[in-house]
């Protein structure tokens, strides 16, 4: 879990300090950060709350770091070729199509890197 290590470093907190806050030993934190110990749901939830990120971000399922931000908030005019006002006027189906296409392109790009 390099993301956990990165977030911990950003907050300038040691494995020991973080472990005490969430009830995990420093060794346990090391195992979690090095993906040698499974991150259970309870610990993932506590870490996400502590760092104010989503569990999906911790697990690498999204690159949107800010908890609660949606792709609608991340999309910008340059990405979709329309203003925020124009985007807001779209139907939910149209917005979903844009989100789905953005995810498709992102996944396709990640496949190209392999």
Image (spheres, helix red, strand yellow):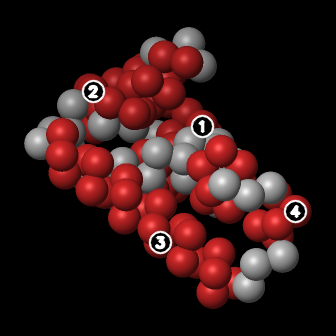
In terms of sequence position, does the residue under pointer 1 or pointer 3 come before the other? Answer: 1
- Coordinates of residue 23 in the picture (x, y in percent): 46, 40
Crowd tier of the residue under label 1, counting other residues whose Cα lies within 10 Å: few below 14, some 14–19, many 20 or above: some
- Please tell me which of labels 3 and 4 falls first in the chain: 4
Asked if disc 2 and disc 3 are in contact, CB closer than 8 Å, the reply is no
1 vs 3, front mark:
3
Which residue occupies 68% across, 61% down?
72
| Left or right of 33 in this view: 90 | right
**Coordinates of residue 14 in the picture (x, y in percent):** 46, 15
Mark 3 Cα-neighbour bin, 10 Å: few <14, some 14–19, many ≥20: few
Q: Which mark is residue 14?
A: none
Q: Which mark is first along the chain, 1 or 4?
A: 1
At 31% from the left and 57% from the top, the residue drawn is: 107
State the residue in front, 114 or 37: 114
**Residue tagged 1:** 51
Height in image: 56 above or below 17? Answer: below
Residue under label 4, please give it: 85
Alpha carbon of mark 2 to alpha carbon of mark 3: how far?
36 Å
């Amino acid at each position: 879990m390099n993301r956990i290590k990165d977030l911990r470093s950003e907050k300038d907190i040691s494995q020991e300090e973080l472990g005490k806050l969430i009830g995990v030993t420093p060794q346990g934190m090391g195992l979690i950060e090095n993906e040698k110990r499974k991150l259970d749901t309870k610990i993932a939830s506590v870490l996400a709350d502590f760092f104010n990120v989503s569990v999906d971000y911790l697990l690498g399922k999204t690159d949107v770091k800010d908890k609660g931000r949606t792709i609608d908030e991340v999309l910008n005019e340059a990405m979709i070729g329309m203003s925020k006002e124009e985007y807001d006027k779209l139907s939910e189906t149209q917005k979903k199509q844009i989100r789905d296409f953005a995810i498709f392109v992102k996944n396709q790009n990640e496949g190209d890197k392999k």
